[in-house]
Amino acid sequence: MADIPKNIKSTAIGLHTLFADVYGEKRNVSDILHSFGFTEYQVNTLKTEKITAFYENIKFALACRFLHYSGGHRLLFVLFRRYGLFDYPKETLEGIGDSMGISRERVRQLEKKAMKRLIGGVSSDAVGILIVLAACKTLDVDAMDLLRPAETERDADDEEAAAPPDLPTLDLPHADFYIQGGFNYTSKRGRYQLLMTFGDYTKYFEKKDLEGHSDVSMILLAVIEGLEKLKKPCAVMVHSNTIFGISAIYKDGKLRMAVPEKTANYELKEHIRKLLSENGHALENIADSNIRERIKAWSDSNA
């Protein structure tokens, strides 16, 4: 740690404080990267030989997050100075207000607005995704690989995978689940939406204010609800726009039962495995970037 630049050390401390405020618990960069499937070797590389580039890319990712907001540069400035990030010393509300020529209360309002912009809606872990994108850029990894879990190498020590039933899926009736789900790490509540199609039959379900652990847990709950509604064995295609949820649920075409840092979802995945085995369903999960639009269009047409 002695060779790590002083500004990076102070930024690391500031990020840990920021993550605690965002997630409501102590988390660090390593925790976030592990939770999204980065290997220990990749994380160590980011923390050692590539640490300067990694933190520059985190700064760039945060700046991009605020770029499209009105007054985003000022919100980012307040955020950096409140948490002591990227060469900015950690400052009080009064100190920032004096330098900007505004009141302490106005700085507090800007800080609150900055946090709201950073966290975003409940549909994704916005902060985690920013860190992941910075890591992918630093390691020259294609972030889109996370959309294609079947192409990644399987590590038997990391997980215990359960294969879906070996069924003649072409002979099964086909059903589609269109799912979006998210968890708000500030309020500790989640929600999901599920649009099911089966031939000419369509059914919509929405659950809000759910207790959970992550975006992934919301997606799993929606999958469970859909499977429980089916009255006969079906070949089910699950469409989801939460790409990290997809990579956490499936790997090498198999249901992932245990994923590092996501063990809280084990019971939900076990529930899915039992539904598949007992009811004869075949299940496949794919990425679909138009879930929100599809669900909204259906809702609008049936309002």
Image: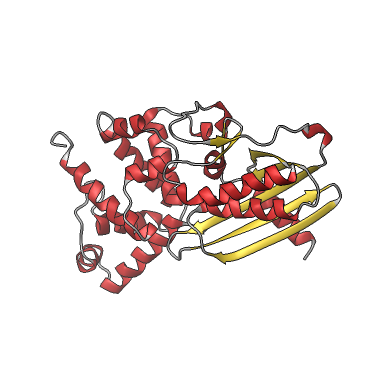
Q: Is residue 45 visible?
A: yes
Snapshot quadrant of residue 164? top right
Query: Does residue 211 lie above or below 61 as drawn?
Result: below
| Residue at (60, 34) in percent of width and height | 254
Query: Does residue 128 lie above or below 42 as drawn?
Result: below
In the image, 300 versus 161, the foreground residue is 161
Estimate the x, y position of residue 181 in percent, counting from the top left. Answer: 58, 54
In the image, 290 versus 214, the foreground residue is 214
| Residue at (43, 49) in percent of width and height | 65
Image position of 128 (left or right of 41): right
Its colouring scheme is secondary structure
Q: Please state, as top left, top right, bottom left or bottom right, where the N terminus lies in the image.
A: top left
Image position of 281 (left or right of 210): right
Image position of 14 (left or right of 135): left
| Residue at (42, 40) in percent of width and height | 132
Estimate the x, y position of residue 94 in percent, counting from the top left. Answer: 21, 69
Query: Does residue 87 lie above or below 143 as drawn?
Result: below
| Residue at (42, 55) in percent of width and height | 118
